[in-house]
Amino acid sequence: MPRELSLAEVFQLGYYWETKILLTAVKLDVFSLLDGQGRSAAEVAQKLGADCRALELLLNALVAIRLLTKTGAVYANTSVATTHLVKHGPQYIGHLLLLHDAEWGNWGKLEEAIKTGRSPVTQHVFETDPALGANVLSVLHRIGQQSGPDLAKRLALGQAKTMLDLGGGAGTNAIAFCQVYPSLSATVFDLATTLPVTERTIKDAGLEGRIALKAGDFNRDALGGPYDVVLMSDILHYQDLATNAALVKKIHSHLNPGGRLIIKDRFLDASGTSPAWTAAFAVHILVNTEQGACYRTAEAMQWMHDGGYVSVEEIERTAVVQGVKPSAGQS
Ligand SMILES: C[S@@+](CC[C@H](N)C(=O)[O-])C[C@H]1O[C@@H](n2cnc3c(N)ncnc32)[C@H](O)[C@@H]1O
C-alpha cells in the first residue's frame, strides 16, 4: 500500500497559485524582456503596458518561486529561466506552458464535466489552434529526442524497410527509427497544418531523402503503403473508442503480410488508477477533448484482435502494444 498523504501534502495539492503565476509570466513573456539585462518593475510594466503595482507583485512572487532574482529594485532571470523561458532560445519550453494556460478555462469547467459527463470543448488544440499545436510539437520533439532511439532499439525492427508514423507530429519517432535502422525509410502522415514543423525537424536531422510527408486526416484519407511497420504514438487518446477500433482495422490493409502495428500511448492498467500520471492525464483528456479518453491496454489489444491482427501482445506495460498482420496462410 502506498503511504497515506499528510495534511500538509493535501494542502499542497489544492494550492495552484504558483502555477498560474508562472503561466501568466510566460504568457506576458516577462522572461524575454529580462533577457540579458535586469530591469525595474516600472520598466517592465512600461514595456508590457501593464499596471506597475500589480506587475511588481507578480515579479516578487517569481523571485520567491526562484525564477527571478531581485537586487535592490532590479529584477533578472535565474539561469533556468534564461535557458528555458526566454523565447527564441534553443531550449525554450514556454510553448508547453502556453498550452497549459490555454487549457486553464477548460479546467475551470471540470465540475460541470464530471456532473454531465460531457467535455466543455468540441475540438482539441491541434484543431482549434494549429500554430500553438505546432509549437508544442517542437517542444515535445526536443524532449522526445532522448527517448526515441531507445524505443526504436527495443522494438527490434531490423528487417523492416518501410514505416508509417501515423499522426507522427514533428517526426520525432520517424527520425529516431531511421537513425537507428539505416535501411529503413519512413512516411510521416499528419494534418497539413502540422507538417511544416515536421519538414523542419526532418531537414535539421538531414533525413529528407528517407522520410516522406503525407498530409491528410487519418480517419478519412488513404494512408499509402503498404508498409512493414505502422506506428501510432500518442494519437489515440484524442479519439473515441469506435473511431480507434475503425482506424486500427483500416491500417491492416496498409500493412504488408507479416507487418507490425505498434501502438504507443498513455494506457491505464486494469484498475484505472495507475500509472499515477496517466490517472490524472485521463481527467485532463476529459476536460480538454470532446471525444478522447485514456484507454486500457486490453482495449487496444481488442481493437487489434477485432481488426484481424495476430500475435497481439503488450510489449511494454501500459505503454506499447503490438499486433502482426498474418502472413499468407497464417491466421
Ligand atoms: C500528441 S501528437 C503526437 C505526435 C507524435 N506521434 C509523437 O508521438 O510525438 C498528436 C498528433 O496527431 C495529429 N493528428 C491529430 N488528429 C489527426 C488526424 N485526424 N489526422 C492526422 N493527424 C492527426 C496531430 O496533428 C499531432 O501531430
Image: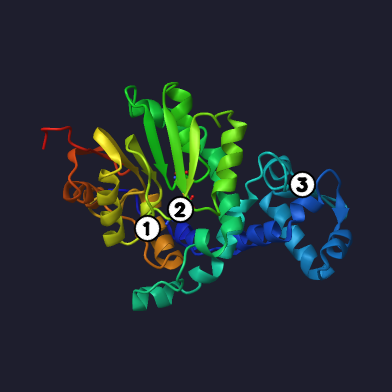
Camera-nearest residue between 330 and 83: 330
Label 3 vs label 1, nearer the camera: 1
Residue 57 lies, with reference to residue 64, above or below; the image says below
Within 8 Å: ligand 1 and the Cβ of disc 1?
yes
Q: Earlier in the sequence, mark 2 or mark 3?
A: 3
Q: Residue at x 26, y 48 (%)?
A: 297
Q: Earlier in the sequence, mark 3 or mark 1?
A: 3
Q: Label 1: which residue?
A: 220
User: Can residue 125 be seen here?
Assistant: yes
x%, y% of residue 133? Answer: 56, 55
Q: Label 2: which residue?
A: 216
- Disc 3 marks a residue whose amino acid type is Asn
Q: Secondary structure at mark 3?
A: strand
Residue 330 figure quarter:
top left
The Cα atoms of the two marked residues, 3 and 1, are separated by 48 Å
Q: Residue at x 53, y 43 (%)?
A: 170
User: Can residue 316 be seen here?
Assistant: no
**Crowd tier of the residue under label 3, counting other residues whose Cα lies within 10 Å: few below 14, some 14–19, many 20 or above:** many
Q: Secondary structure at mark 2?
A: loop
The Cα atoms of the two marked residues, 2 and 1, are separated by 8 Å
Camera-nearest residue between 94 and 212: 212
- Disc 1 marks a residue whose amino acid type is Arg
The Cα atoms of the two marked residues, 2 and 3, are separated by 42 Å
Within 8 Å: ligand 1 and the Cβ of disc 2?
yes
Q: Residue at x 72, y 45 (%)?
A: 88
**Crowd tier of the residue under label 1, counting other residues whose Cα lies within 10 Å: few below 14, some 14–19, many 20 or above:** few
Q: Which mark is residue 54?
A: none
Circles 2 and 1: CB atoms closer than 8 Å = yes
Camera-nearest residue between 207 and 268: 207
- Disc 2 marks a residue whose amino acid type is Gly
Residue 321 figure quarter:
top left
